[in-house]
Image: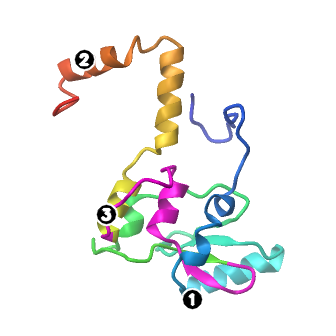
């Protein structure tokens, strides 16, 4: 696997592409209502001037950079730990909003963010937004890590899971019990 801009990696066989909206549509009715910030409202208006109404995932943390939004048919941006803290290092309880074509606005939940980051729906997170945000934002998506391991193991780069663990332990990279 090679990551580079403009290079498209094929999905594993048996999978179909899914935008962020399709991945979390079942959760949206349970997410708390929200209101767009002025810059978010402006971004929606600009989007609608050139596009048909479609669900938008809008980050609340644009700061000095351009505000980031994604139409529902596209994958979401990577969710970073910094989305859960402000410029002073304080915790944020709201980090992204979902604008729906009927005008409703929902606040993206931790459960929704976790699914967008690749966590399975059954994974349980702590109740504190900051702690859950740290887990989500610092993570390598589990589905990516699984595919990477399978690919590495299949190509013979890693002889066995136990060999790689013992090599890492000898190198001092792993701590604790395996």
* Front position in the image: 121 or 147: 121
Residue beneath the point at 34% across and 70% down: 129
The C terminus: image quadrant: top left
Query: Closer to the camera: disc 2 or disc 1?
Result: 2
| Numbered disc 3: secondary structure | loop
Our reading of the magenta stretch's main secondary structure is loop
The residue that disc 1 covers is 38
Spot occupied by residue 160 in the image (x, y as percentages of width and height)? 39, 14
Which stretch is magenta? 100-128
Q: Quick check: 33 above or below 135?
A: below
For disc 2, the marked residue is 166
Q: Can the viewer see residue 78 in this picture?
A: no
Asked if residue 159 is positioned above or below residue 137 in the image, the reply reads above
- Disc 2 on helix, strand or loop? helix
CA gap between label 2 and label 1 equals 53 Å
Count neighbours of disc 1 (C-alpha within 10 A) and say few if under 14, some if 14 to 19, many if 20 or more.
Answer: few
- The residue shown at (51%, 38%) is 144
Q: Residues within 10 Å of mark 3 (few under 14, many from 20)?
A: few
Identify residue for label 3.
126
Residue 122 as seen in the image, left or right of residue 5: left
Q: How is the image coloured?
A: rainbow
Instruction: Give x and y (percent) for residue 82.
Output: 38, 63
């Amino acid at each position: 696997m090679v990551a580079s801009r403009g290079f498209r990696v094929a999905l594993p066989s048996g999978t179909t592409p899914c935008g962020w909206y399709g991945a979390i549509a079942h959760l949206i009715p349970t997410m708390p209502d929200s209101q767009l910030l002025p810059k978010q409202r402006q971004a929606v208006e600009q989007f609608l001037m050139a596009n048909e109404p479609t669900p938008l995932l809008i980050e609340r943390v644009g700061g000095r950079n351009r505000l980031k939004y994604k139409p529902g048919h596209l994958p979401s941006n990577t969710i970073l730990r910094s989305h859960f803290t402000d410029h002073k290092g304080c915790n944020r309880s709201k980090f992204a909003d979902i604008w729906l074509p009927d005008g409703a606005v929902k606040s993206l939940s931790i459960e929704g963010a976790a699914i967008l980051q690749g966590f399975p729906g059954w994974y349980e997170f702590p109740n504190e937004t900051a702690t859950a945000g740290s887990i989500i934002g610092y993570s390598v998506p589990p589905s990516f890590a699984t595919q990477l391991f399978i690919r590495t193991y299949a190509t013979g780069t890693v002889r066995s899971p136990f060999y790689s663990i013992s090599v890492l332990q000898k190198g001092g990279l792993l701590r604790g019990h395996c």
